[in-house]
Amino acid sequence: MNEFFEEAKKKLNDGLKTVNGQKQKVVAPAVHDALLDFCRQDAEFSQAVAQGGSFADCMDAVAKGVGKSISDLEAFRRAVQFFFPGADIRFKMEIDLCASVSGDPLRECSAEEDGAAKTQQTKIINLEDFF
C-alpha cells in the first residue's frame, strides 16, 4: 500500500457513519467502497482523500442536483472529482459467456452444437466506445 492509504481508509470508514440525507445514505456504501479501491490503486489519490474534505461533504456533492436516481458511474465520478478536481474514472466491463461452467473468466470454453465442438472466447466491451 501507499503511505496515505491507512489514513484515507480511516477517514472514509469514520465518515461513512456521519453521512446525512436520504440520497446520500443510499449511495454512500457503494461510493465508499469505490473510493477505497481507488485509494489502493493510486498513492496521490489516497493523499488527496486523506488531506481533503470530509466524506459527508463528498456525499453532499455527489447528491447535489440529483433527481430520482444517479448511476453508479456518475456517483463515483462526482466523488473522485470532489477529492481530486479534474480527475475522471474509466469503467471496463467484460462478458463471460462461460461463467456458469468456468471458475476462470478468461478461460476458453467449448460447447457442443450439432455434434461439432465450437470454441467461444470472452468478449470485451469497452463502454468508452459508445461515447
Image (cartoon, grey):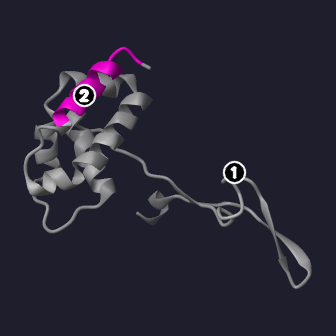
Q: Nearer the viewer, mark 2 or mark 1?
A: 1
* Total residue callouts: 2
Q: Tell me the residue at 28%/41% (across/down).
A: 32
Q: Tell me the residue at 30%/49% (across/down).
A: 30
Front in this rendered view, residue 85 or 20:
20
Q: Tell me the residue at 77%/58% (across/down).
A: 108
Left/right of residue 30 with respect to residue 69 in the rendered view: right
Gap in angstroms between the C-alphas marked 2 and 1: 34 Å
Task: Give the quadrant of residue 68.
Answer: bottom left
Q: Quadrant of the C terminus?
A: bottom left
Q: Quadrant of the N terminus?
A: top left
User: Is-magenta flag for residue 13?
Assistant: yes
Residue, disc 2 = 49
Is residue 126 placed above or below 87 in the rendered structure?
Answer: below
Q: Which residues are magenta?
A: 2-15
Front in this rendered view, residue 42 or 97:
97
Left/right of residue 25 with respect to residue 105 in the rendered view: left
The mark nearer the N terminus, 2 or 1, is 2
Left/right of residue 91 with respect to residue 65 in the rendered view: right
Instruction: Indicate the position of residue 114 as horizontal and vertical percent values.
Output: 88, 85
Question: Which amino acid lies under the numbered mark 2 shown in the image of this protein?
Answer: Val
Instruction: Indicate the position of residue 115 as horizontal and vertical percent values.
Output: 92, 81
SS label for mark 2: helix
